[in-house]
Every structure is written in C-alpha cells, then in structure tokens.
Amino acid sequence: MLNRTALEALTRRPLPFLASAWPWRGAAYLAASAVPGVAAGLTVAAAAGGTLVNPALGVVAGLAALALAAVLVAPFERLRLRLVDAAPVPRPPDRRRREAGLAVMTLLALWWIDLVMLSFTIGGPLVLALSPVLQPALAPIVGVLSTVAGVLLLPVAAYTITAWAGARGAMARAILAPAQSELSEVLRSRARLVDAFELERRRIERDLHDGAQQRLVALSMSLGIAGLDLPPDSEAARLVRQAHGEAKQALAELRELIRGVHSQVLTDRGLAAAVQDVAGRSAVPVDVAVDLPGRLPAPVEVTAYYVVSEALANLAKHSGATRGSVTGRVERGTLVVEVRDDGAGGADPGRGTGLTGLADRLAVVEGKLSLSSPPGGPTRLRAEIPC
C-alpha cells in the first residue's frame, strides 16, 4: 500500500514501517525546525539590540524582524511539509496569509517544541544504550541492561517521532489548505470539466450541422431530381423513391440528434425559447410558462435546459402522464424551474431515471434539486440555480 503521509505510514506492520524511510523523514522534518529557530533567535537579538538604545525602538525592531522572518520562513514551511505529507497541498486564494500565520506560530512556539520532542525521544534511548561508555563506573550488569533497554526503546522512538511529525504535518496542512479549500478546488475542477464537455458538444453539433447534414441534404435533392427523370412505374424509379425516403428520414433523425447534442435555439434566443422548442417536440402535451427578465448567464441557461430536457424525456418514457407543464422564473437572484406531470408518480433516483445525473449537474453550478413523486402522482421536479 502506498502511504502518502506519515500518519498513514503508522498503520503499516511494525517491520515494514521500521524498515521504511518514514521514521527518518519524520526526524528530518522535526530537525528542520532549527531553521526557524535560528530566525527566532535573530528576531530576539534584533529586539534586544534595539532595546539597549530605546525601548520603543526595541519593540519596533522586534516586530520588523518577526515580520521579515515570517516572510522568509513561510515558503520553507510549505517546502518541508513534503517530508511527512507527499499529497499535493492546494493553494487557496488567501495562501499568503495562511503561510504567514503558520510561520509566526512556528517562530513563536512550534520550533522549540519540535526540537525538544526530537531531543528527548532520540536522546533518551541513546543515553541508555551508551551508558557503559558514558559512565564506566557502572556495574557490568547495569550497563548491559541499560544498553538493552536503550536498543529496545529505539523502535518506540521511531513511532513517537513519526507520530509527532505526522500530527505536526497534519496541523500545517489544515492551516495552509483547510478541507473547505480542497472541496472548493474539486468543485472548480468539476466545473472546468463540464465547461470543456459543453465546448466539445458544441463542436460536435457544428460539425454535424455543417458537414453530415449538408451532405444528406445534397443527397436527398439529387435523389429527388433523379426520380423525376425516370419512368414513374419502373423498378429504378421505385428504388430511387425508396432511397429518397430513407435519406429524408436519416436527415430528420440527424436534425433531432443535433438538437439533442446542443440546442441552437438556446444559443440564439435564450432559455425561454429553447424550453418552448423542446416542449413542442415532446410526445406528451406540455404547457410552458417561462417568464424571465432577459438572458441569463450561459452556464445557468445550459444547465436549466439540460434539466428540462431530461425531465421531459423521463416524463414521456416513465410517468404514463397525459399532460405536463414547465414553469420558470427568477426569484431573488435564483432561477427556479419546475416540471410537473399528472402521471403515476413513484419516481426513484435509484432506478436509473437520470435524476442522480441531474443532481450532479446542478451541483456544479451550486444548484439544488428537489423531487416530489408520491405513488399515484403527481410528480413535481424543482431545480434552483443561482444566477
């Protein structure tokens, strides 16, 4: 198993853990606190030197030295975190302030706690192991027992050092990039993926519209013209008419596919017109009442259109309804879209009707999906999208 943090490494079996580099990395992480320790010493020296001249000057010099030391130590703290946490650390918008806060905490307290912990954890077993050399006057049996105890405590020291270094690293990560910022980065990444997917859909729609559709139109016209030059009752005329009908059917299906890939009506005329268009092509009669103040942001319109299209497809396939309705309005900066039907109800997101996909698509734009579909109906789907 690949361990990415010192705390994860502690869960390994003892021998693989002790044979790994994690105890050494933890010790190096704690020993690196000597660097902010030197910076803290220089800060104190600057404050003391200024105090000898003037107390106020000492305060100013100390604060200035602390600020300078924090600026220098901040990137060092992020850099040495890699010793105990190999996972990438996100960079939130306020990362400079967070790095400075961690640096000040390290300069004021954490550096000496790290060094004291490292010294006692390693020093104790080493002193016991070397006691016969350090104190020749010890009785031989006492020296042997001390050496054995020191050697046996070294694995305990490895666990202690790794645990403290891992906890220190987890605290540093929590300050540099809290879980909320990581979640925000995930949401931004998902939004970028959705945008890229939407651009690809538009490219496919454009290629189909300008390429395959035009060729089918030309083929249909050629077959129609060819049919005019043949005797009406001939076998060749019958085959040409059949091919002409197939070409027209293929053209109609291609146009329907293009509308499903991306609605040109949505791009040209906005959400209200696009909803009217998709409702007009529904197999079930659908009443539309979409009242909007004007064009909405493109991600909002695309998401709302996707919700309405999928909801009307579900209505036609699964609900058994005889009539449906779509309403849309903007309430306090939020687009509210509702799709209702008079069907049998009982819609269940777990049955693969696309409701889970709708909720995921809405989550990208921080929207919400609610569903009311008791057995026997009616069904009401409500989507709320911040504008």
Image (spheres, rainbow, N blue to C red):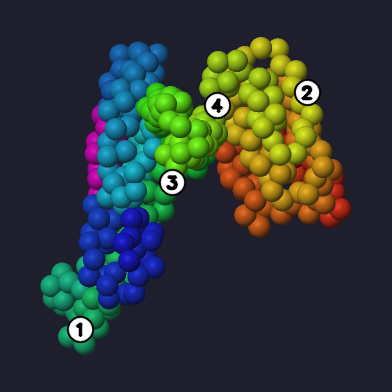
Please state the extent of the stretch shown in magenta in the rendering.
Answer: 30-42
Q: Quadrant of residue 2?
A: bottom left
> What amino acid does circle 2 point to?
Ala
For mark 3, give the secondary structure: helix
Residue sitting nearer the eye, 237 or 343: 237
* Rendered residue at 65%/51% (across/down): 353
Do the residues bearing badges 3 and 1 touch, measured as CB atoms within 8 Å? no
* Place of residue 288 in the rendered image (x, y in percent of width and height, measured from the top left): 76, 26
* Place of residue 186 in the rendered image (x, y in percent of width and height, measured from the top left): 46, 40
For mark 4, give the secondary structure: loop
- For the image, the number of numbered tags is 4
Choose the circle earlier in sequence order: 3 or 1.
1
> Which residue occupies the extreme bottom position in the image?
141
Q: Quadrant of residue 162?
A: bottom left
For mark 2, give the secondary structure: strand
Residue 171, labelled with which disc? Answer: 3
The CA distance from mark 2 to mark 4 is 19 Å
Choose the circle earlier in sequence order: 2 or 4.
4
Choose the circle earlier in sequence order: 3 or 2.
3
Choose the circle earlier in sequence order: 4 or 3.
3
Choose the circle earlier in sequence order: 1 or 2.
1
> What amino acid does circle 1 point to?
Val
The CA distance from mark 1 to mark 2 is 91 Å
Residue at the disc numbered 4: 263
Label 3: how many residues lie within 10 Å, few (<14), some (14-19) or many (20+)? some
Residue 11, labelled with which disc? Answer: none
The N terminus is located in which quarter? bottom left
> What amino acid does circle 4 point to?
Ser
